[in-house]
Amino acid sequence: MSFLLRNKNAILFDMDGVLYDSMPNHSKAWSLAMEKFGMHMSSHDVYLNEGATGHDTVVRISLRDRGYEATETEINDIYGYKAALFRSMPEARIMPGAPDVFRKAAAAGLKIMIVTGSGQKNLIERVQKDFEGFITRDRMVTAFEVTRGKPYPDPYLKGLEIAGVSASDAVVVENAPLGIRAAVSAGIDTIAVNTGPLDDDILLAEHPVLLMHSMQELADSFEKLI
Ligand code: MG
């Protein structure tokens, strides 16, 4: 779709799987943490649930695997263990093409925001250094800023509010089905970037306006969208 970014004022980026190639680490960490607590989360499950908060992910898998809701204490234990495992893993690389997209978006005069379900403090800190000059903490919506995470529209609505733009003035870049659903529910045109192992059809079912296969592809086609 040509000119998708024309007349837009803001671009809202998801973080994991968009700015960082961090999903393989999340997948490993979730699967080990769930196993320790007697549940099972396959890599496919992790990618399907991506974007939801850690809290909601534990609730969903507990209901599915054990038939009952996890207690708050248990949720904190499981997510705490998962987060610690994630922190102990080698640093995820910056997604190739993501810095190019940021540079081109800024040059086009678009306000840049990050809207993530993440509560991983180390990555939330790191992104401000890796994308210095483009992003500050007050331009980020994380698990700490909203009660209801993706796939609810709340994180993206909060992002619009902070950016001071309406839904029709913004574009979202997302890699996860639940993330696309959240952005589309907020009424925002969404570019899906399929950087993981899911079939395109799973992402397309959430109605993005455009689907690409890498951030580099988005960077390379950026001029065509302006
Ligand atoms: Mg993501």
Image (cartoon, rainbow, N blue to C red):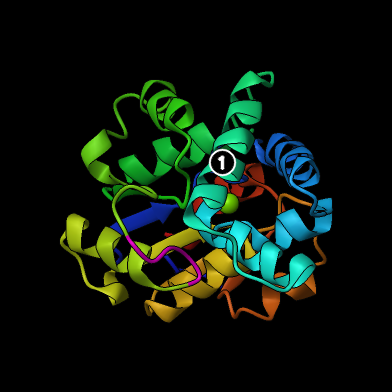
- Which of these two is toward me, 207 or 159? 159
User: Closest to the observer: 24 or 71?
Assistant: 71
CB at mark 1 closer than 8 A to ligand 1? no
Q: Is residue 143 left or right of residue 216?
A: left
The answer to if 149 sits in the magenta stretch is: yes
Say which quadrant the N terminus sits in: bottom right
Residue 21: percent from left, percent from top:
66, 36
Q: Amino acid at mark 1?
A: Asp
Q: Is residue 83 magenta?
A: no
Please state if 175 lies on the left or on the right of 134 as rendered. Answer: right
Region rendered in magenta = 147-151
Instruction: Tell me: 124 left or right of 73.
Output: left
Compared across the picture, whether 95 is left or right of 43 comes to left
The answer to whether residue 53 is visible is no
Q: Residue at x 61, y 57 (%)?
A: 58
Q: Quadrant of residue 212?
A: bottom right
SS type, badge 1:
helix
Examine the residues drawn in magenta and state their main secondary structure.
loop
Residue 20 horizontal/vertical position (percent)? 59, 35
Residue found at x 38% / y 20%: 129
Q: Position of residue 36 (x, y in %)?
A: 77, 40
In this rendering, is residue 10 above or below 65? above
Crowding at dot 1, Cα within 10 Å, few <14 / some 14-19 / many 20+, comes out as some
Q: The C terminus appears in which quarter of the rendering?
A: bottom left
- Quickly name the residue at label 1: 77
Q: Residue furthest left?
A: 164
In the picture shown, does residue 47 fall above or below 214? below
Q: Nearer the viewer, residue 170 or 63?
A: 63
Relative image position of residue 174 (x, y in whole percent): 55, 58
